[in-house]
Amino acid sequence: MLPDRISMLGMGSNHLTPKIKSSYTDLKQICNKDTFIIYEGKSRATQEVHTLRVLNLSHEKVQIDYDKHATLFIKEMVRIASHSPKALQVILNSFEISEQKMAFASIPYNPVPAESNGNLRTLLKEKDIEKMMQDIIADTELFESLEADCSDLITLDSIYRFKEDNVFFLGGWSEALESDLSINLDQSVVRLRDKPDGVYSLGKIALEQLGLRSRDVEKILMIDEPFIHDSAIKGIIAENQNLSPDTKKLIGQLLTKSPEKRMSWRQLKAEFGSNSNTNIFEETKSNNCPYFVANFFGSQ
């Protein structure tokens, strides 16, 4: 539980640590989540633009259980560092805990919907969609090793990309991994029944990034009859002239209405073969990142 004095903190820059405040200028807020805030800022030392992530101390979730959300904040930071030696270097130089404040900088990354100027959605190309699927598979395997359900994370707003390295990853761990103990058993059954699984959600994201409006995708998702649903999906995919037949087939398999007929995570992983970068720990060591990155996730 966070001390009462935290409630006296203001919004925005009041959450920045002293090192971040003194090291960066031209701060621009990119997104504001319940448990963290992301900024873009220019390094005074190098004049490079970096992405800054700050623990959102003003939100009730963090105030109620600071220890849990601070722990997830740090674990996600380590995961971000494992993607890139350049990111790791910036994080090591910038990470700071000052009293209850917590923040770090990294090489630039953004939520996929906010990549273009003015936060307008930039549609991904076919090769980028395939890369996104490949990278998200690696993240889901990491969560499986932690015995954590990441299905709530597989949304467009939770997928981030390093601009320089073209690496996608699931972000906002504490937003999706916290236990919702207020839901009773009957509500949980309804929620699990109605919520699409991660594979379906990934297919939905692919459709949206191919140009289909989100509300149109949602209308299709609401179709109960499997034959009508699947026919609608196939029709939409067939109209896209910029997709290869293999990609059209793959997206169709991800969005099959019946869970029994839908492609599984294991089948999706096999589709990309050994290139799915599933052993992040081995890649971390091969990129000369410290070995603590590989072992940190198992700590509690």
Image: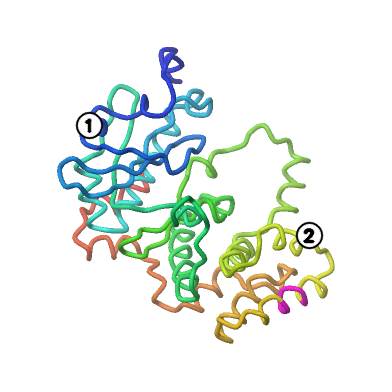
In screen coordinates, is 251 left or right of 65? right
| 191 relative to 149 in the view: left or right | right
SS at badge 2: loop
**Residue at (72%, 73%) from the top-left corner?**
233
Name the residue nearer the viewer: 227 or 245: 245
User: Is residue 133 visible to the viewer in this orientation of the structure?
Assistant: yes
Asked if residue 273 is positioned above or below residue 13 in the image, the reply reads below
Magenta part mainly helix, strand or loop?
helix
Looking at the rendered image, the quarter that the C terminus falls into is top left
Under tag 1, what secondary structure?
A: helix
Report the Cα–Cα distance between label 2 and label 1: 49 Å
Q: Position of residue 225 (x, y in %)?
A: 84, 68
- The residue where tag 2 is placed is 222
Q: Which residue is mark 1?
A: 19
Q: Residue at x 44, y 12 (%)?
A: 4
Residue 216: give x, y in percent of width and height.
72, 62
For residue 66, side relative to residue 101 (left or right): right
Which residue lies at the image location 77% right of the left edge and 77% below the top edge? 231
Q: Amino acid at mark 2?
A: Met
At horizontal 76% and vertical 60% (from top left) the residue drawn is 219
Q: Residue furthest front?
A: 118
